[in-house]
Image (tube, grey):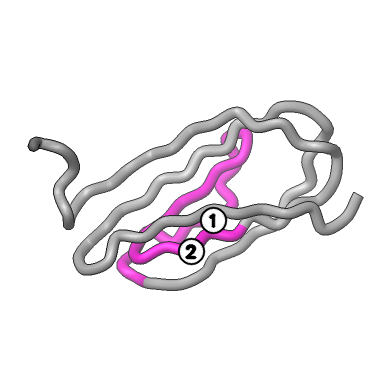
Amino acid sequence: GAGVPRDDFSARWTQPLYFQAGTYRFTTYTDDGVRLWVDGQLLIDSWRPMRGYRSATVRLSEGTHDVRMEYFERAGVALARLTWRRISR
């Protein structure tokens, strides 16, 4: 089928998510480039071929926040993962 090519593609995920108030650490693990925004604030900016973890912390109020992650795959393994956890109240 048509679908997404195996290499040289990019993707964007946008999701409103509910958070309790606190400081959160967002961590990405990607094979190639990644950018992460929360409420339009750029937290992670590693838009180049690479593999590994990137993380950033941000203080969030209780409520819904817009999380957006962009990713690009150059060649080889296509891998993109986002996790977060609250590290303080």
Tell me the kind of residue under disc 2. Tyr
Q: Where is residue 63 in the image (x, y as percent from the top left)?
A: 78, 27
Tell me the kind of residue under disc 1. Ile
Queried whether the magenta region covers residue 3, the answer comes back as no
On the rendered structure, is 59 left or right of 71? Answer: right
Q: In which quarter of the image is residue 87?
A: bottom right
Considering the numbered disc 2 on the image, is that residue within a helix, a strand or a loop? strand
On the rendered structure, is 73 left or right of 52? Answer: left
Task: Name the mark nearer the viewer: 2 or 1.
Answer: 2
Considering the numbered disc 1 on the image, is that residue within a helix, a strand or a loop? strand
Instruction: Count all numbered tags in the image, as a single digit.
Output: 2
Q: Give the range drawn in magenta.
A: 27-50
Q: Is the magenta stretch mostly helix, strand or loop?
A: strand
Determine whether 81 is above or below 59 in the image.
below
Determine whether 57 is above or below 61 in the image.
below
Q: Position of residue 17 (x, y in %)?
A: 65, 32
* Nearer the observer, 4 or 41: 4
Determine whether 48 is above or below 70 in the image.
below
Determine whether 64 is above or below 71 in the image.
above
Residue at mark 2 to residue at mark 1: CA–CA distance: 11 Å
Q: Position of residue 10 (x, y in %)?
A: 28, 46
Q: Quadrant of the N terminus?
A: top left
Which residue lies most toward the left here? 1
* Nearer the observer, 72 or 17: 17
On the rendered structure, is 34 left or right of 19? Answer: left
Residue assigned mark 2: 29
Residue assigned mark 1: 44
